[in-house]
Amino acid sequence: MTNKTMRRALVTGGSGDIGGAICTALAAQKLHVIVHANSGLMKAQALVDEIIAAGGSAEAAAFDVADADASRAAIEGLLADGPIQVVVNNAGIHDDAPMAGMSSQQWSRVVDVSLNGFFNVTQPLLLPMARARWGRVVCISSVAGVLGNRGQVNYAAAKAGLHGAVKSLAREMASRGITANAVAPGVIAGRMTDELFPADQLKAMVPAGRVGKPEEVAALVAFLCSDVAGYINGQVIGVNGGMG
């Protein structure tokens, strides 16, 4: 049961490592969290069950953010239950290859999820936020979108596109009490990074000499989604142990 006075937050890719930590952090701030998954609804529901067991409020939703029609239909269904004041665009994939050997499908798929997915999910939420004169839009980017990374031209392009999007959206919506920011994690512990970076390579890459924790990213996201962060707008903030 959702308390009607609770703010609601939609977190795309909410069942992954960073997404799950964000969902948990927002629930701890007494938001009702909509845990989104692309197809893994069981995983999203498992996180919902954990949040509820800990005294929080949550529900699961599954749709493909890269599919404009499916996204709009799903979001209309969610909005029928009440406004969504917070959206965290965390869904993303990578499909790495040097650009000289990259297929058009690799390019399109990565851009579709990260960048087109941001539009498909966020655009239908903006007018309801504006009517309420309060809203928070956070995009999860990557240090690759700031510094670039070999083999990730598609991923870095998609993430850097989010930076331009939040800076522009902040200018459009700030007078309505809506903020738009990006959080750019560096090397964060989880299924993807554990295989990619051996310990000695990490020490050379990251001034802090360690991987970050998903909870360290989530803490910043939760702060940006709070009332006290209302004057932080149009920013790209790194969580990267000093990488740049």
Image (tube, grey):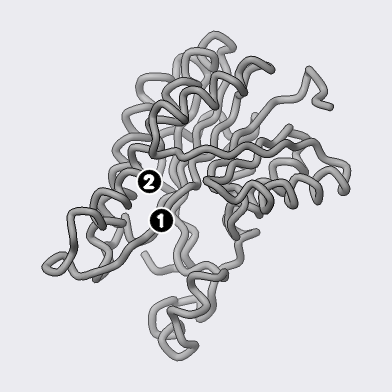
The quadrant of the image that shows the N terminus is top right
Label 2 sits on a secondary structure element that is helix
Q: Is residue 118 above or below residue 43?
A: above
Where disc 1 sits, the SS reads: loop
Residue 181 coordinates in the image, percent (x, y): 45, 38
Query: Image point 88% across, 42% down: which residue?
Result: 55
> Could you say which disc has been placed on residue 28 in the image?
none
Q: Which of the pair 31/222 is nearer the observer?
A: 31
Q: Amino acid at mark 1?
A: Ile
The residue lying toward the viewer, choosing from 202 and 101, is 101
In contact (CB < 8 Å): disc 2 and disc 1 = yes
User: Is 111 displayed left or right of 238 in the figure?
Assistant: left
Q: Quarter of the image for the C terminus: give it.
A: bottom left
Seen at 84% across and 43% down, the residue is 52
Name the N-terminal-most of marks 2 and 1: 1
Picture quadrant where residue 243 is located: bottom left
Residue 208 visible in rendering: yes
Crowd class of label 2 (few under 14; some 14 to 19; many from 20; radius 10 Å):
many
- For image coordinates 32% across by 52% down, the residue present is 110
In-image side of 117 versus 103 (left or right): right
The residue positioned 57% from the left and 69% from the top of the image is 190
For the residues labelled 2 and 1, the Cα–Cα distance comes to 7 Å
Q: Which mark is residue 114?
A: 2
Indicate the amino acid at tag 2: Ser
Place of residue 172 in the rendered image (x, y in percent of width and height, measured from the top left): 36, 19
User: Residue 148: image x %, image y %?
Assistant: 26, 62
Q: Name the residue that disc number 1 marks.
A: 93
**Nearest to the observer: residue 207 or residue 115:** 115
